Amino acid sequence: MAAVTFEHATRAYPGSDRPAVDRLGLDIEDGKFLVLVGPSGCGKSTSLRMLAGLEDVDAGAIRIGGRDVTGLQPKDRDIAMVFQNYALYPHLTVAQNMGFALKIAGRPAAEIRRRVEEAARLLDLTAYLGRKPKALSGGQRQRVAMGRAIVREPQVFLMDEPLSNLDAKLRVSTRTQIAALQRKLGITTVYVTHDQVEAMTMGDRVAVLRDGVLQQCDTPRKLYEEPANAFTAGFIGSPAMNLLTEVPVRDGAAVAGDVRVPLSRAAVAAAGETGTVTVGFRPESLQPVPAAEEGFAVTVNVVEELGADAFVYGSLEGPGAEFATADVVVRIDPRTGAHRGQRLRVRIRPGAAHVFSSTTGGRLPA
Ligand SMILES: Nc1ncnc2c1ncn2[C@@H]1O[C@H](COP(=O)(O)OP(=O)(O)OP(=O)(O)O)[C@@H](O)[C@H]1O
Ligand SMILES: [Mg+2]
């Protein structure tokens, strides 16, 4: 087991005008589960491959357990990687697939058998050890890929979207299993996904990347409650946070129609008195109010029923609507019922608004 550090690690692919990963700095404590998340093309796989030694590091350094591994071959880094496509050998049995790396390393047969059987027990694969991969379900294949990593007893696990070939239900149960297994084994893990729900449910900490640049690395709760900028605010959370852009600042508040969001002095100073800010509020931070009260008018376009919750996707109407660039999402009690075309009046719960700079996107103290 070991801590992992990215020190301003940069990768610029030849012929590209901008680094795919730009001065990435991350500290992952020994035994922790870190998730790298972000939209397609933001540099997640490149970051993981740099750590694995499969991609050059053009500037900066990478350390595993305090040791600078930047120039080391993948085989000398004591890591095990689980890929999206599992890359199992079709002509080998489950047991042979799982023990393959140990066999190459010249371990004695008895030790290989013991380690494979132990991993199979952990992963519920004992009954399948003699089968070939083609005779397994997708979820079982995924577990064999995990098993192959586990038997190596590496210092670090690296996983790149290991659940993306599974159906939605299996993804949910498998992500819980992987998270539980990681906690049990206590092996430092770096896990890549583009799915923010997966990131939030699995990681001790989550690092959000955008265009090769780290936006924020925090616990899931901190990311949700205190996103460091408007991008992270919009990326983390499902449905996404509502964002009103270029809302003018007047008399110490952001003013959208007849809604006033009081601002701290620091926020006003950062925006300038006649400047603007971005105002964010989550679907659950809106509450219905009587027609005469301060609030937004929302016309319901779609109601999404999820059983325990329901979400209204609606258009902001009247004063303040000019700041909305997309449908506003409101969480409602499903028992109250709402239907297309209905008009709601909602307000932002006091203290629940997030405020971001119009220029940098950075969080302003509310
Ligand atoms: N071998 C390569 N040569 C040149 N450019 C590359 C190469 N691999 C990736 N890129 C570019 O680097 C950027 C980051 O790619 P990367 O694969 O790390 O993204 P990602 O976050 O893993 O995306 P996804 O979620 O789609 O897997 C992208 O713009 C991509 O086009
Ligand atoms: Mg990728």
Image (spheres, rainbow, N blue to C red):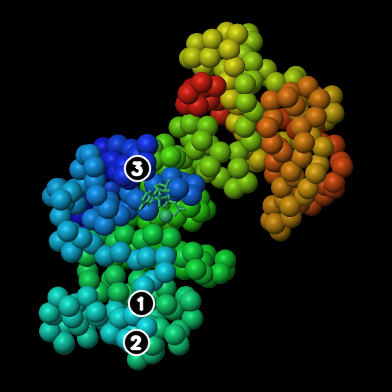
Q: Residue furthest bottom?
A: 130
Left or right of 158 on screen, residue 260: right
Q: Nearer the viewer, mark 2 or mark 3?
A: 3
Decide if residue 244 is on the left or right side of residue 204. Answer: right
Specify the quadrant of the image occupied by residue 158. bottom left
Identify the secondary structure beneath mark 3. loop
Q: Which residue is mark 2?
A: 91
Q: Amino acid at mark 1?
A: Leu
Q: For mark 1, what is the residue?
A: 88
In the current view of this chain or complex, which residue is farthest to the front?
15
Quadrant, the N terminus: bottom left
In three-dimensional space, the C-alpha distance between marks 1 and 3, rounded to whole angstroms, equals 33 Å
Q: CB of residue at label 3: within 8 Å of ligand 1?
A: yes
Spatial CA span between label 2 and label 3: 39 Å
Point out which mark residue 199 bears.
Answer: none
Query: In the displayed structure, does residue 60 sit left or right of residue 88?
Result: left
Is residue 345 shown above or below 268?
below
